[in-house]
């Protein structure tokens, strides 16, 4: 009797806790046939809306078409279920409930789904839903398509407890304060309970921390922190519908929303640009300015220094930025490991990229890091063309030491180049566009400050090892330099290459050198009002000479003689903007890419007739040319050849950059450059 009773008790327990799993396999012919679907031919599909309701072991599947019909597609023998924008699939049971669903993606790209009930999260191509319902729908709200390999549905004989339609009665006191926009949260008194009547999207969520963001009519973002259990786990960018309630609170100087209730499932997703962090590289000082209001925003900063990490996860972020006096100064921001992320090993001289949430603790600003990674090396051409002053960079290229230059004006400077003549242009890589492009070598100065030992160490090297040159960028719009804090490593057994230099002729073309470029320039040496200049044949172009790099050289030059000068070119001021863009202050505004660089005023017009007055030429060496020093009517061109950056010579211009070699009947030669 005891044995029979034991079996009876076990049966009752089994009935109370019974659960089963049902698999919908869209990835194989056998799985499709088990659902009554005929596998489609190559590059063809079967529309689920045409198939109708599919039932497997008591679980039914139906589909809704989106921008394209929801369908099983055969791509070269690989079968997937594809849901297009606004399409959906629904799982339901006639008795019992659905308590769990696992959705396995065939492709993690565009794997965005929203559940109308319960909690749904997705990570690394696996979507996990939990709840208790008789029916649940998954909608794909974004463009392109979501591709699914299989779905596993877990069922129970317990009745459902979730209401797919939410709470239509909205049990909120009609007299409660209403809040229509996050921008107006600060106007509420502390301890005011309110109902939110607008829509906000998720910027980040961790445990009881839910950061929301909302745009105003001009596209500016406003943020708020909801602290408390909202009983939902949202995707980034999930739009939370109106109707939830909370209490406006200020805690240790931070405005937040507490006692959250009535949070429903997301209705849609915003595009990724809306919840990418604001790029504060070189602008960390703005975070510390209360008037800027960066608390509760997600930010990123590249090339910063980390220090003072303690056992509690506290640390210090240091960014080198310009102050009002245009001096480079350290700006520090405290950090605290609220989210329990794993810190990388901190190395001396290394810089790091950080993403995190700005918060206030005891009325002081600090950062909760979401991720910390060692800053990857940056190609020198990106630093000199797109770099931001005050940013710490690690140079990815081998750099060649061209000219150590200790002088009273510049200090301990070492000029280097990457000497590249072709680059992989990847500025549009995120859109799928990259290409190789002929390029001109980039030049930059390494500034050792007053550190004589550092200067002597680098000056003794020939080839600097990639990712060992680190420094803070300065003067990128005029004469770019990296303020070096530690000695780089020398690349062992590397040969010093032939340098690729442009040769400019003052008489025949515009001087289009970059600041701190090392190259050759041809012109007549003249003294004008006692000052040295390099001039064109008729003195219409007059460029100031500065002999700081070789003070003895001037005494070796003869006035009126044409010389080929190997020189460093310097810009006296920034070039004027080519459009009517006005200077702009960095603002929290959502724009494509969410990356904004503040425009700075520029004063010298590159297109002006006297543009060349913005140059100073610093000669290193000189040799007299064989060219005539005045216009000769009998002088005629005998040959013109074009040499590309790979050294290939031809009679016609080649794609990309060309060195143009022109030979004359008097034996003279000129060298210029053109871009086809």
Image (cartoon, rainbow, N blue to C red):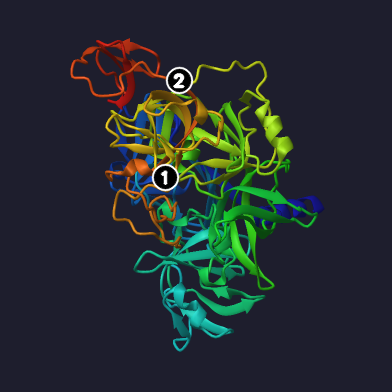
Tag 1's secondary structure? strand
- Residue 605 visible within the image: yes
Point out the tag, 1 or 2, that comes first from the N-terminus: 1
**Number of the label disc, if any, that sits on residue 623:** 2
**Position above or below: 275 against 468:** below
Where does residue 161 sit, x and y in percent of width and height?
Answer: 54, 65
The answer to whether one can see residue 162 in this image is: no
Residue 327 image point, x, y percent: 58, 56
Q: Residue at x 68, y 26 (%)?
A: 460
Q: Where in the figure is residue 105, as x and y percent of width and height?
A: 48, 39
Cβ atoms at labels 1 and 2 below 8 Å apart: no
Q: Which mark is residue 55?
A: 1
Q: CA distance from mark 1 to mark 2?
A: 89 Å
Q: Nearer the viewer, residue 132 or 53?
A: 132
When the figure is inspected, residue 276 is found, relative to residue 566, above or below; the finding is: below
Q: Secondary structure at mark 2?
A: strand
Q: Nearer the viewer, mark 1 or mark 2?
A: 2
Residue nearer the viewer, 215 or 63 = 215
Q: Residue at x 49, y 82 (%)?
A: 187
């Amino acid at each position: 009797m005891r044995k029979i009773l034991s079996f009876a008790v076990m049966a009752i327990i089994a009935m109370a806790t019974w659960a089963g799993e049902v698999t919908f396999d869209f990835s194989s012919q056998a799985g499709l046939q088990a659902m009554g679907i005929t596998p489609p031919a190559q590059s063809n599909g079967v529309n689920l809306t045409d198939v109708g309701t599919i039932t497997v072991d008591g679980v039914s599947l139906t589909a809704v078409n989106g921008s394209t019909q929801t369908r099983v597609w055969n791509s070269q023998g690989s079968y997937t279920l594809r849901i297009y924008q606004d399409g959906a699939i629904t799982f339901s049971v006639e008795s019992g409930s659905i308590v769990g669903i696992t959705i396995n993606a065939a492709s993690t790209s565009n794997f965005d789904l929203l559940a109308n009930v319960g909690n749904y999260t997705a990570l690394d191509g696996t979507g996990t839903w939990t709840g208790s319902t008789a029916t649940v729908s998954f909608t794909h709200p974004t463009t392109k398509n979501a591709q699914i390999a299989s779905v596993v549905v877990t069922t129970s004989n317990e009745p459902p407890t979730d209401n797919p339609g939410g709470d239509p009665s909205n049990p909120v006191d009609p007299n409660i304060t209403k809040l229509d926009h996050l921008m107006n949260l600060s106007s509420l008194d502390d301890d005011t309970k309110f109902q939110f009547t607008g829509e906000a999207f998720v910027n980040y969520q961790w445990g009881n921390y839910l950061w929301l963001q909302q745009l105003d009519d001009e596209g500016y973002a406003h943020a708020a922190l909801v602290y408390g259990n909202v009983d939902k786990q949202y995707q980034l960018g999930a739009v939370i519908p109106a109707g939830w309630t909370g209490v406006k609170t200020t805690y240790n100087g931070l405005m937040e929303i507490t006692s959250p209730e009535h949070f429903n499932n997301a209705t849609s997703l915003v595009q990724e640009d809306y919840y990418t962090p604001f790029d504060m590289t070189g602008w960390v000082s703005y975070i510390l300015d209360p008037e800027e209001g960066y608390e509760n925003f997600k930010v990123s900063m590249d090339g910063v220094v980390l220090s003072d990490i303690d056992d509690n996860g506290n640390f210090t972020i240091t960014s080198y930025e310009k102050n009002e006096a245009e001096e480079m100064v350290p700006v520090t921001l405290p950090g605290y490991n609220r989210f329990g992320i794993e810190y990388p090993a901190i190395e001396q001289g290394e810089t790091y990229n950080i993403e995190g949430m700005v918060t206030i603790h005891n009325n002081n600003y600090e950062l909760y890091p979401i991720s910390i990674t060692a800053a990857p090396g940056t190609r020198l051409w990106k630093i000199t063309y797109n770099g931001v002053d005050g940013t710490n960079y690690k140079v990815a290229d081998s750099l060649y030491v061209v000219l150590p230059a200790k002088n009273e004006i510049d200090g301990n400077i070492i000029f280097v180049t990457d000497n590249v003549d072709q680059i992989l242009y990847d500025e549009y890589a995120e859109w799928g566009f990259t290409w190789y492009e002929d390029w001109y070598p980039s030049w930059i100065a390494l500034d050792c400050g007053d550190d004589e030992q550092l200067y002597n160490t680098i000056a003794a090297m020939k080839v600097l090892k990639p990712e060992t040159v680190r420094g803070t960028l300065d003067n990128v719009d005029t004469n770019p330099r990296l303020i070096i804090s530690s000695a780089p490593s020398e690349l062992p057994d590397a040969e010093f290459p032939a340098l690729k230099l442009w040769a400019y002729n003052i008489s025949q073309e515009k001087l289009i050198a970059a600041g701190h470029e090392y190259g050759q320039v041809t012109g007549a040496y003249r003294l004008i009002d006692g000052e040295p200049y390099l001039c064109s044949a008729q003195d219409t172009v007059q460029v100031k000479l500065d002999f700081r790099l070789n003070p003895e050289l001037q005494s070796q030059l003869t006035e009126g003689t044409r010389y080929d000068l190997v020189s460093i070119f310097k810009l006296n001021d920034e070039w004027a903007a080519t459009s009517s863009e006005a200077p702009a202050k960095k603002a929290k505004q959502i724009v494509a890419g969410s990356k904004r660089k503040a425009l700075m005023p520029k004063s010298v017009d590159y297109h002006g007739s006297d543009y060349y007055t913005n140059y100073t030429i610093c000669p290193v060496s000189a040799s007299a040319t064989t060219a005539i020093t005045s216009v000769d009517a009998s002088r005629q061109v005998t040959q013109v050849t074009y040499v590309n950056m790979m050294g290939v010579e031809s009679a016609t211009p080649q794609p990309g950059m060309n060195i143009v070699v022109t030979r004359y009947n008097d034996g003279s030669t000129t060298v210029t450059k053109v871009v086809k």
